[in-house]
Image: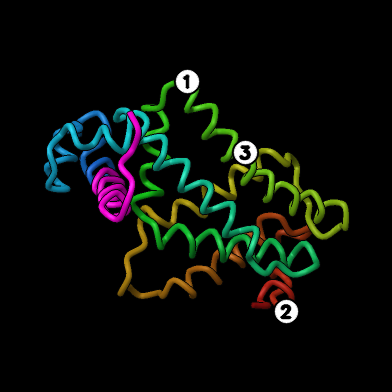
């Protein structure tokens, strides 16, 4: 069924996506019905099908939009030239971007299991592009003799998991600001990949903003 056009569609479509994101992240995809999403927006359940074909399509769209926004934002991020500076930029970017979108991050990781195989494969392809961006930085650092990494794939996945984990515990107004957390993680990641893990990282390079 074709979507409505005009100003009302431009308002209702985003409202539906925001309501679905909030409800899915709070209650879980399986527990939320299309009728409940419609009630949250204040429209009839049938109205939702003017904007999305079904609940699975809505979940996929939310996840795809999140990953595409992530990739676009990273492509525009100032990165520096040397691998340590680029790695520091990745760490700061990842933490900042994800802390600004807690619901989307929760959905992107916790509801992958709810995607049908075709949609799962498409989201995984986008996730792989982001992981490859980090792997390219690490690979360049190894080639330049700046990083020492036993297994590139394992290091890539470990760093991303470590950075994304900030979302599970960080709360605004606590002891550390987002920026301070980012800088601490820059140092920790530097130690993780540095050629001499017992020495302090080169903060003169990694500390560049």
**Label 3 secondary element:** helix
The image's colouring method is rainbow
Q: Is residue 159 magenta?
A: no
Chain part drawn in magenta: 1-22
Q: Which residue shows up at 63% across the image and 66% down it?
A: 77
Q: Residue 143: give x, y in percent of width and height.
A: 87, 52
Q: Mostly what secondary structure, the magenta segment?
A: helix
202 left or right of 145? left
Spatial CA span between label 3 and label 1: 16 Å
Q: Which residue is mark 3?
A: 128
- Label 1 vs label 2, nearer the camera: 1
Q: Which residue shows up at 15% across the image and 34% down it?
A: 45
Q: Are marks 3 and 1 in contact (CB under 8 Å)?
A: no
Residue 117 marker: 1
Question: Seen from this angle, which residue lies furthest right?
Answer: 144
N-terminal label among 3 and 2? 3
Spatial CA span between label 1 and label 2: 46 Å
Quarter where residue 72 is shown: bottom right
N-terminal label among 1 and 2? 1
In this rendering, the answer to whether 80 lies above or below 27 is below
Residue 204 marker: 2
Spatial CA span between label 3 and label 2: 31 Å
**Label 1 secondary element:** helix
- Which image quadrant: the N terminus? top left
């Amino acid at each position: 069924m074709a979507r409505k056009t005009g100003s009302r569609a431009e308002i209702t479509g985003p409202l539906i996506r925001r309501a679905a994101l909030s409800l899915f992240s709070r209650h879980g995809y399986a527990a939320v019905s299309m009728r409940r999403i419609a009630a949250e927006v204040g429209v009839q359940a049938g109205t939702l099908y003017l904007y999305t074909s079904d609940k699975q399509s809505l979940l996929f769209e939310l996840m795809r939009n999140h990953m595409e926004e992530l990739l676009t934002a990273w492509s525009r991020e100032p990165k520096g030239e040397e691998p340590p500076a680029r790695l520091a930029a990745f760490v700061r970017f990842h933490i900042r971007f994800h802390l600004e979108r807690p619901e989307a991050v929760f959905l992107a990781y916790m509801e992958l299991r709810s995607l049908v195989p075709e949609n799962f494969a498409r989201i995984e392809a986008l996730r792989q592009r982001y992981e490859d961006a980090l792997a390219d930085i690490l690979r360049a650092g190894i080639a330049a003799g700046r990083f020492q990494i036993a297994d590139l794939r394992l290091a890539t996945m470990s760093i991303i998991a470590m950075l994304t984990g900030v979302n599970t515990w960080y709360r605004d107004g606590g002891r550390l600001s987002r920026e301070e957390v980012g800088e601490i993680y820059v140092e920790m990641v530097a130690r993780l990949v540095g050629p001499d893990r017992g020495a302090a990282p080169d903060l003169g390079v990694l500390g560049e903003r």
